[in-house]
Amino acid sequence: MKITGFRHETYLMKMDRAISDCNQPEGVELLPGSILFIETDEDISGLGLGFGGEAIASLFSVIEGQDPREVLGLWMIMNDAVHKGGNEGAANAALSMIDVALWDIKAKIAGEPLWQTLGASEGRVKAYASGLDYCLSDEDLFVFYRRLAETGIDGGKLKVGLDFEADMRRIGIMQDALSIASDDPVLMIDANEYWSPKQAIRYVRRIEDKYKIEWVEEPARRWDYNGLRKVSQQVAASVATGENLNSIADFFPLISNGAVDVANVTTGHSGATGCRQIANMALGYGIPVSMMNAQANFMAHVAAALPNHSAMEVVDPGREHCLTFDNHIEDGFIVLGDSPGLGIEVDEKTLADLQANPPTGKGTFPLSRREGAGRYIVPPAAGEVPWRTGK
């Protein structure tokens, strides 16, 4: 079997609801989508999902004609190809999508779901709810977490960082919404790198006077292992970080310097192969990992095969416009089906319609960084978010 070609499709979608964090609290409604098809001479194609893809053609040229089953070897070839310029940005996005598509092919050849090809004993991954919710009203916030709690999910992660009083109130709302799934729901908060380490310590300590926080995510800059370690040592909550890094090389200084208590892993860490490398390194240090959210929850296949995986983020804002997928949430877990590969199919008619008629809406992902980040806190103005009317 040989790799013979690829097809790359991009489109724009409008989500069912806006998403946001403290850096861009007003939120965005539009999300770019990217679908990659890797083709073979035996009519088995692989699917990769992501963003962008400007570097796909150049990376594809180094694996064309190779056997797609040699996924690890092909990953090394691609990683070597981007050596001089660095495995980041467009190169990382392309490598990640190609790698996932190759794993999809490998599992389809075996006639089994990807979680099985990767060695998991079951296609089942614990989930937690994540609203990307800074722009939601208090009422909508409760509805979001209660809806996922009704599926058995007993943990939630709230966006915080600009208004302490509002954050305290909204953590309580999340806790109340999740209480139907557990008498002691797991509470997490996420500041998305807005604070300095000292700001984070002061802020989180005040929150911990009332709430038991499982982890604080990105309380300081993603590369600041000194600052992140300082936060970890001075608050009760674990420090979770890493989603915006690119590879195992970026994680090494965090892990080796004791700066991360929970490693957030994702397809953006050089695909499924790179993600597994990071999880294995974390395992050696006794550090748990948590999979970040993914369109159609496709990275749950990888999460299921990680021995140190805790729970996977579920956002559920409506991103599957042209996709059908073989998984669902039940009793607090993402339950993966038995369809070969990722279990994802593309509705070509809907995709073509999205491309021909791009939607309009408020703002486009990714989110930008807010004024004052790491220096001083800029609270949301009246009207910037629905829960802020005065002050």
Image (cartoon, grey):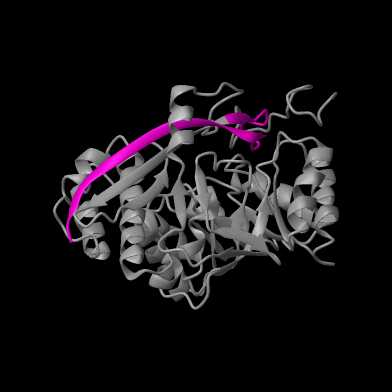
Q: Residue at x 85, y 44 (%)?
A: 169
Q: Is residue 194 left or right of residue 72?
A: right
In the depicted view, which residue is nearer to us: 24 or 306?
306
Magenta stretch holds residue 19: yes
Which secondary structure is most common in the magenta stretch?
A: strand
Give above or below for 70 relative to 45.
Answer: below
Percent position (x, y) of residue 279? Answer: 44, 66
Q: Quadrant of residue 349?
A: top left
In the depicted view, which residue is nearer to us: 256 or 246?
246
Percent position (x, y) of residue 80? Answer: 20, 53
In the depicted view, which residue is nearer to us: 34 or 191?
34
Residue 248 seen in the current view? no
Q: Quadrant of residue 228?
A: bottom right
Residue 185 seen in the current view? yes
Percent position (x, y) of residue 96? Answer: 35, 50
Give above or below for 100 relative to 29.
Answer: below
Q: Which residues are magenta?
A: 1-29
